[in-house]
Image (cartoon, helix red, strand yellow):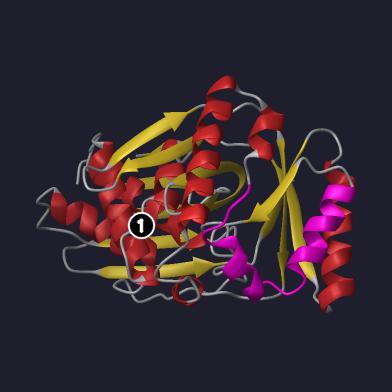
Amino acid sequence: MRYARAVVSSPATIANFGPGFDSFGLCLDSPRDQVTVRKAKSGFFEVKVKGKNTVPTDPMENTASYAAIKLAESCGCNDLGFSMTIAKGMKPGSGIGSSAASSVGGALAMAAMLDVKDKGLILEAAAMGEELISGARHFDNVAAALFGGFTVVSDVRKRTILQIRPPRFQIVVVIPDVTIETRRARAVLPKKVDMGDAVCNLSLASGMVHAMMKRNVRAIASHLGDSLSVPYRKSLVPGYDAVRDSAMAAGALGVSIGGSGPAVFAIAQGSASKIRLAMAKAFKESAGLASESFVTVPGTGAKVESLS
């Protein structure tokens, strides 16, 4: 390793982002994981986790350390050894890319220590970390966390990622006290879909990309509809319809499910506090669920905070 210590912050993300199932991702400015990696003797691996959010500490079961190991292997590093500390900024299974944040943080930290600049290698290693949790190598969350802004996985076979700088708008995120594993969320989806639903999503997804490029917030919000995943996954989010309706009544421009859920997010301009309270109240009154919530804006991706 060229460096002995790296500190990386890696952000939450919203995968799928409306009609872009397994394709669209939006980086959030906050919350963030912080991953610190220190060089250790060859063959020594240690993972420590700070905060109330529990994740595995086995280096081969933790997404951050696993991604770091895979990044090093891809670069031919044979004398690997490290101590990693992860300060979790988000709850696992919440629908805002917790595992992706850790995966990207681990991969980017190891890349920084090895002086690797190739983001393609970092992206692939981070996706391997995601694979530990979901059972498949998905790129929507990790691409958004690594590159920032709005990302489109336009060709998963070639790992082609399109990057669009979104306009600034408020994102209200409410996470009810329910945990949904990615594998379970994928299991409720149908193997085949109606042609009309497929065409609807294709139209909405095309409009979303145009709206992002035009930096039109209202148009972005109006293209959040989805016929491929939300109709099936909302059954895993008790009170979803009531929360959506309450958000819209409070001034939201658009509402959808974050990733696999249970997070529900709303797009707003100037009325975020009112929307946040309305959504939390709806979860409580319609489903008896307490919730956590925050307001953020689109973010710029993972960052190497220090390197020595």
* Identity of the residue drawn at 81% across and 73% down: 290
Residue 272 part of the magenta-drawn span: no
- Indicate the secondary structure of the residue bearing disc 1: loop
What are the residue bounds of the magenta stretch? 225-249
Q: Position of residue 194 (x, y in %)?
A: 47, 61
Q: Quadrant of residue 192?
A: bottom left
Which quarter of the image is occupied by the C terminus?
top left
Which residue appears farthest toward the top when viewing the image? Answer: 214
Q: Position of residue 107 (x, y in %)?
A: 32, 51
On the question of residue 249 being in view, the answer is yes
On the question of residue 11 being in view, the answer is no
Would residue 42 appear left or right of 258 to someone viewing this image?
A: left
Q: Amino acid at mark 1?
A: His
Other residues around mark 1 within 10 Å, as few (<14) / some (14–19) / many (≥20) = many
Would residue 238 appear left or right of 227 to someone viewing this image?
A: right
Query: Which residue bears the numbered disc 1?
Result: 138
Taking depth in this image into account, of 258 and 59 the one nearest to the observer is: 258
Q: Is 59 drawn above or below residue 141 in the view shown?
A: below
Q: Position of residue 147 (x, y in %)?
A: 42, 36
Q: Quadrant of residue 85?
A: bottom left
* Identity of the residue drawn at 89% across and 56% down: 278
Taking depth in this image into account, of 263 and 195 the one nearest to the observer is: 195
Taking depth in this image into account, of 35 and 90 the one nearest to the observer is: 90
* Identity of the residue drawn at 41% across and 42% down: 146
